[in-house]
Image (spheres, rainbow, N blue to C red):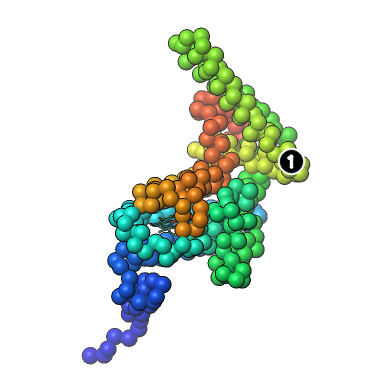
């Protein structure tokens, strides 16, 4: 009988190499406690998940950097985004394993880690960069100039972590930029003309105000005068905010062309979300939905990390020198990338108040004879 040729499991998966990676600072696994091996292993598992996420995000970004974006590529982008969401959701569950460390267990080896922190995870930063996190949103960890300073080597030299981050920054526009550019090119009810987009926005805002007034009427009658006044103020604020968002009042500092593109992108978001059942808008809507789901899964991951940290080390200073839990909660609150996608959820109208389209036939799969 001939011997089986070809590769086997342990060679293909590189099992021996993989199992030799948990030996800690002294590269001697026999000197490392079970608690520390757990700590190292969970970090390594996360870094592997981050690696896969980055590969998928490269695919998503390259789809949207095309102009035009071929319709048939949208499904591939959505598949990649869904995979990232699934990974972040599973990764958030890993904190449960870390929580089997008691405070005392962790303190037994924590002191030797001072100076090392997840804050130096280059792949986490790469994910934020490829998605498009604005630098001015970043919070300093321990008073360093920028997040990049924390990635310098001990003598100020370029570390492999910093080299990764620099390469990511040099790799071109983020997914958010590419997505917003795509939205800014999206025809709205059959046209991309600026005047047409403005008309669409105005019609939508009239309906939006009508919906708010209906709600004031419906809920106000049952309330005492004081509560009614408060309610009216709140609905008026909603009306004003909707107008400010769609007319781009917050964009005034940008060049005119960029303001116009962003207003168009926002109108496109309202348009796609409002008419999501039309066949030709179903995949664009799916792109928005999975992008939002991805951001949501990252926020939950950050919040869950903070709760694990609070449980294991309380509110003490982090090994990276940050305020610990307070720092982590602040990142969960502030590190939002796709603000416009979230903002639109506040504006949407119920179906019977959504302005109807003048050219719904443009959005069927095919025009019937
Ligand atoms: C007992 C376990 C852990 C504790 C007590 C802990 C604690 C902390 C603290 C206090 C920070 C804030 C920065 C600092 O001052 O160090 C931080 C940041 C971070 N940690 Fe953890 N961590 C733990 C495990 C993990 C694991 C397993 C990962 C997986 C990769 C991780 C990923 C991160 C990341 C990416 C940051 C940076 C967050 C940001 O700047 O947005 N941590 N961690």
In the rendered image, residue 128, in percent from the top left (x then y), is placed at 55, 55
Rendered-image quadrant of the C terminus? top right
Question: For this view, does 11 lie left or right of residue 368?
Answer: left
Q: Who's the residue at 72% across and 41% down the image?
A: 259
Residue 78 shows up from this direction: no
Q: Is residue 215 above or below residue 320?
A: above
Q: Who's the residue at 65% across and 63% down the image?
A: 170
Dot 1 crowding, Cα within 10 Å, few <14, some 14–19, many 20+: few
Residue 253 shows up from this direction: yes
In the rendered image, residue 261, in percent from the top left (x then y), is placed at 70, 43
Question: For this view, does 235 lie left or right of residue 90?
Answer: right
Based on the displayed image, in which of its 4 quarters is residue 364 positioned? Answer: top right
Q: Which residue, given by chain and number where applicable, does mark 1 sit on?
A: 253
Q: Who's the residue at 60% across and 47% down the image?
A: 137
Rendered-image quadrant of the N terminus? bottom left
Q: Who's the residue at 61% across and 69% down the image?
A: 156
Q: Is residue 328 above or below residue 206?
A: below
């Amino acid at each position: 009988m001939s011997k089986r040729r070809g590769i086997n499991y342990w060679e293909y998966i590189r099992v021996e190499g993989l199992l030799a990676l948990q030996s800690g600072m002294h590269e001697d696994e026999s000197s490392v406690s079970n608690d520390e091996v757990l700590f190292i292993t969970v970090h390594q598992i996360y870094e592997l998940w981050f690696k896969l996420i980055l590969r998928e995000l490269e695919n998503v970004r390259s789809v949207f950097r095309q102009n035009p974006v071929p319709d048939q590529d949208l499904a591939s982008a959505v598949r990649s985004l869904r995979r990232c969401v699934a990974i972040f959701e599973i990764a958030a569950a890993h904190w449960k394993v870390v929580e089997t460390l008691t405070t005392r267990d962790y303190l037994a080896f924590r002191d030797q880690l001072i100076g090392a922190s997840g804050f130096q995870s280059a792949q986490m930063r790469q994910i934020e960069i490829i998605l498009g996190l604005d630098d001015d949103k970043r919070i300093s960890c321990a008073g360093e100039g920028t997040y990049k300073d924390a990635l310098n080597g001990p003598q100020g030299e370029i570390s492999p972590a910093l080299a990764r981050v620099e390469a990511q920054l040099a790799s071109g526009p983020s997914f958010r930029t590419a997505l917003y550019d795509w939205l800014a090119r999206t025809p709205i009810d059959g046209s991309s003309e600026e005047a047409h987009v403005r008309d669409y926005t105005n019609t939508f805002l009239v309906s939006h105000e009508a919906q708010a007034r209906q709600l004031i009427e419906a809920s106000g009658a049952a309330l005492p005068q004081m509560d009614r006044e408060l309610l009216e103020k709140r609905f008026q604020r909603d009306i004003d905010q909707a107008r400010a968002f769609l007319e781009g009042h917050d964009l005034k500092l940008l060049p005119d062309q960029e303001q116009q593109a962003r207003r168009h992108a926002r109108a496109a978001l309202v348009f796609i979300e409002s008419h999501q059942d039309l066949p030709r808008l179903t995949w664009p809507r799916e792109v928005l939905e999975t992008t939002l789901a991805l951001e949501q899964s990252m926020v939950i991951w950050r919040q869950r990390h903070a709760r694990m940290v609070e449980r294991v080390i309380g509110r003490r200073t982090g090994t990276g020198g940050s305020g610990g839990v307070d720092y982590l909660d602040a990142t969960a609150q502030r590190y939002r990338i796709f603000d416009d996608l979230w903002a639109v959820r506040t504006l949407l109208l119920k179906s019977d108040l959504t302005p109807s389209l003048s050219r719904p036939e443009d959005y069927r799969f095919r025009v019937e004879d």
